[in-house]
Image (cartoon, grey):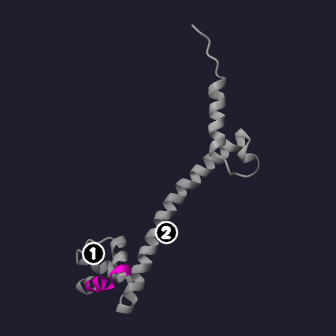
Amino acid sequence: MSRVKRGMMHSKRRKNILKKVRGYKHGRKNLIKLAQTAIIKAGVSAFTGRKLKKRAARQMFSIRINAALRPLGGKYSSFIHQMKVANVNLDRKVLSQLAEKYPAVFTKVYESVK
């Protein structure tokens, strides 16, 4: 059996790590141990950030709906309850888009639910 030299894979692995941390500050950009830790932490933050982005979008939907309801004399919470009672299955994203781009349609939806 022939001998396997592992220097190539060792360099490749390190090179890939350093490629991912390009642009980081201090030792995190050129010391392998610090770079590996930085990559892991960056991945965790990215995962959390993706979840927070969805949360912020949903908050924005409810704010837009509430802002459109106030001039009509309604409240967000009672409107959502009335929608469930009337069995209107429009999600918050669609409602916020209606409120923002098509206020006349949103008003009709509100009147039909009310």
Q: What percent of the width, then of the height, locates residue 57?
A: 45, 69
Residue range corresponding to the magenta coloring: 100-108
Within 10 Å of the Cα at label 1, are there few (<14), some (14-19), or many (20+) other Cα atoms?
A: few
Give residue 59's mark: none
The kind of residue tagged 2 is: Ala
- Residue 105, by quadrant, is bottom left
Is residue 77 toward the left or the right of residue 53 in the image? left
For image coordinates 64% across by 42% down, the residue present is 19
**Which secondary structure lies at badge 1?**
helix
Q: In front here: 42 or 97?
A: 97
The residue that disc 1 covers is 84
Q: Picture coordinates of residue 63 (x, y %)?
A: 44, 79
Q: Amino acid at mark 1?
A: Lys
Q: Which quadrant would residue 68 be assigned to in this image?
A: bottom left
In the figure, residue 48 lies in which quadrant?
bottom right
- Of the image marks 1 and 2, the number of the one nearer the N terminus: 2
Query: To which residue does mark 2 refer?
Result: 56
Q: In the rendered structure, does residue 11 fall within the stretch colored magenta?
A: no
Residue located farthest toward the right when viewing the structure as drawn: 26
Dominant secondary-structure state across the stretch colored magenta: helix
Can residue 73 be seen in this snapshot? no
Instruction: Name above or below for residue 74 compared with residue 15.
Output: below
